[in-house]
Image (spheres, rainbow, N blue to C red):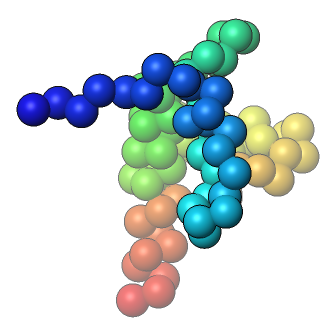
Amino acid sequence: MVASSTSNNETANTADSTDGATRRLSFAKIHEPLDVPNLLALQTDSFDWLVGNERWQARVAKAVEENDLSVATSSGLSDIFEEI
């Protein structure tokens, strides 16, 4: 049998924590839209960094020209092999 939710949402969301329970925040009603990250680009960029392919090397060269320190200058596999 499925438990029914309480009819008084305000009481459920803002209950005092007198019994030691923590107060729960409700994210059910977010009024502004959230930006969704481009997960495919994130995954392909991570793979490019791991294997150190040409796309990643071009990205590193561009970052070095722009003095951008947020891009790693060594690939993931080379870092792993250096540690071994």
x 60%, y 68%: residue = 20
Residue 36 screen position, x and y as percent: 57, 20
Q: Position of residue 69 (x, y in %)?
A: 82, 53
Tally of numbered tags = 0
Q: Residue at x 43, y 37 (%)?
A: 43
In front of the other: 6 or 35: 6
Q: Is residue 44 above or below residue 38?
A: below
Using the rendered image of the protein, determine whether residue 53 is visible from the camera's viewpoint: no
Q: Nearer the viewer, residue 29 or 18?
A: 18
Residue 51, compared with residue 19, is above or below; it is: above
Residue 28 vs residue 32, the one in the foreground: 28
Q: Is residue 6 left or right of residue 68?
A: left
The N terminus: image quadrant: top left
Instruction: Indicate left or right for 53 with 29 as reference.
Output: left
Location of the C terminus by quadrant is bottom left
Note whether 56 is above or below 11 in the view shown.
Answer: below
Q: Residue at x 67, y 63 (%)?
A: 18
Q: Is residue 34 left or right of residue 80?
A: right
Image quarter for residue 26?
top right
> In which image quadrant can residue 68 be found?
top right
Q: Residue furthest left?
A: 1
Query: Compared to 43, does 9 lie above or below?
Result: above
Q: Quadrant of residue 11?
A: top right
The picture places residue 63, in percent across and down from the top left corner, at: 78, 41
Q: Is residue 20 visible?
A: yes
In the displayed image of the protein, which residue is found farthest to the right? 67
The percent position of residue 28, horizontal first and vertical second, equals 55, 22
